[in-house]
Amino acid sequence: MPFHFAILGLGNIARKFAEDIALIPEATLVAVGSRSLERAQAFAADFGAEHAAGSYEATFDGPRVDAVYIASPHITHKELTLLCLERGIPVICEKPMGLNLAEVEAMVTIAREQKVYLMEALWTRFLPSTLKLKEMIDAGIIGDIQSIRSDFGFRANDLHLALQHPPLGAGAERRAGAIAPASAPKRNRILDPNLGGGALLDIGIYPQFLSQFLLGEPEEIHATARLSPRGVDLDTQVTCRHAGGKLSHNYSTVLGRTKTEALIIGSEASLHWHPRWHEPSSFSLLRGKNDPPENFYFDYEGANGYRYEAEAVMADVQAGRTENEHWSLDDSLALHRTLTAVREQIGVRYPRESLRDS
Ligand SMILES: NC(=O)c1ccc[n+]([C@@H]2O[C@H](COP(=O)([O-])OP(=O)(O)OC[C@H]3O[C@@H](n4cnc5c(N)ncnc54)[C@H](OP(=O)(O)O)[C@@H]3O)[C@@H](O)[C@H]2O)c1
């Protein structure tokens, strides 16, 4: 039986995800939901979806939906996830799963109470390069991991506007989580506090994921950041001390391009994950000082890299599982405990947001 996907929020990432599920023979995009019927109809036409809805709620008025991919801005993830969970519909929700730990806890609690599938779309966890890396670590090729250094950075569009004084529109901040009408002016999501902007939640989540995936949840967190006049983080350094005193150095920025690479330093060898390490890429194993690097290449034949997380969801839902064993809800909780702790240290708080209780 074909697996029926629906998508809520039809922006940039929704399009890439739709392109990738089109590569999975057993998957079909059956429904798309937007704040604008016109946008939903155009998207549905592009990807052959049977049902186009002009509201998120109406997305479920059409054919059977086996799982929903939530592709809207962070501030709406909790509300839209609950909309699906209440209907008993499995969810794969874009990262960050919630705006803060309190939101993620509420989402996880409801998913577990209702016994409905939920997974954060931490796609990097499912890539063949990540699976190979894990296999090599488990085989002892790298030895004992001592520390990790990774980064993710690019220069955001409209950065000059975000750096302007006095703060733009400070009197017009919306309640965090409110879904704006489709007619609202288009803003740069990454620089907008109303949309949960900032480097940490958008891209810093990847270095933090890598360090926790390989070294576990940190025991100590030291974070420092540069904030925009409107209070989103532009440049964030997080240094973590993990079990056994191992360190991770996790850097994200929207002020300029970085190499976006990762170095995993082990007692037997080190692994250099080439730019951009979080997506389909290549890596080199660095053994002795005089040994040439051993290179590993991963070719995805035109895919964006999202099909692997989609296939994981399909396999889980078809098997009746309510969580993924490789990126579980406990993994998301641990990641968001750190991200929220970092935000407390660097002083990023979104309009009318409460970090600890939603
Ligand atoms: N996994 C990845 O590689 C990756 C890459 C980029 C982004 N993301 C994540 O995906 C999410 C969306 O990012 P994106 O870059 O696709 O954003 P985007 O291009 O701005 O699209 C987001 C869509 O969400 C809907 N939406 C609902 N409420 C909205 C609001 N208040 N303001 C603006 N749009 C709203 C809109 O679709 P409708 O008008 O159709 O409802 C909009 O087109 C973010 O949480 C981000 O972290 C993940």
Image: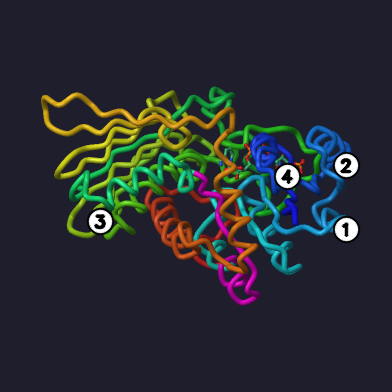
Of labels 1 and 2, the one closer to you: 1
Label 2 sits on a secondary structure element that is helix
Q: Residue at x 23, y 48 (%)?
A: 247
Q: Residues within 10 Å of mark 4 (few under 14, many from 20)?
A: many
Q: Which residue is mark 1?
A: 61
Q: Earlier in the sequence, mark 3 or mark 2?
A: 2
Vertical position of residue 160 compared to residue 144: above or below: above
Q: Is mark 4 within 8 Å of ligand 1?
A: yes
CA separation, marks 4 and 1?
Answer: 16 Å
The x, y position of residue 306, in whole percent, is: 58, 41
Q: Earlier in the sequence, mark 2 or mark 4?
A: 4
Of labels 3 and 1, the one closer to you: 1
Quarter of the displayed picture in which ligand 1 can be seen: top right
Residue 110, magenta (yes or no): yes
Inspect the image, locate mark 3, and give the three-letter code of the amino acid beneath it: His
Q: Is mark 2 within 8 Å of ligand 1?
A: no
Inspect the image, locate mark 1, and give the three-letter code of the amino acid beneath it: Asp
Res 340 → quadrant: bottom left
Asked if the residues shown at circle 1 and circle 2 are in contact, with their CB atoms under 8 angstroms apart, the answer is no
Q: Which residue is mark 4?
A: 9
Q: Which residue is mark 3?
A: 242
Q: Residue at x 50, y 64 (%)?
A: 329
The x, y position of residue 168, in whole percent, is: 62, 33
Q: Residue at x 81, y 45 (%)?
A: 35
* Magenta-tinted stretch: 107-123
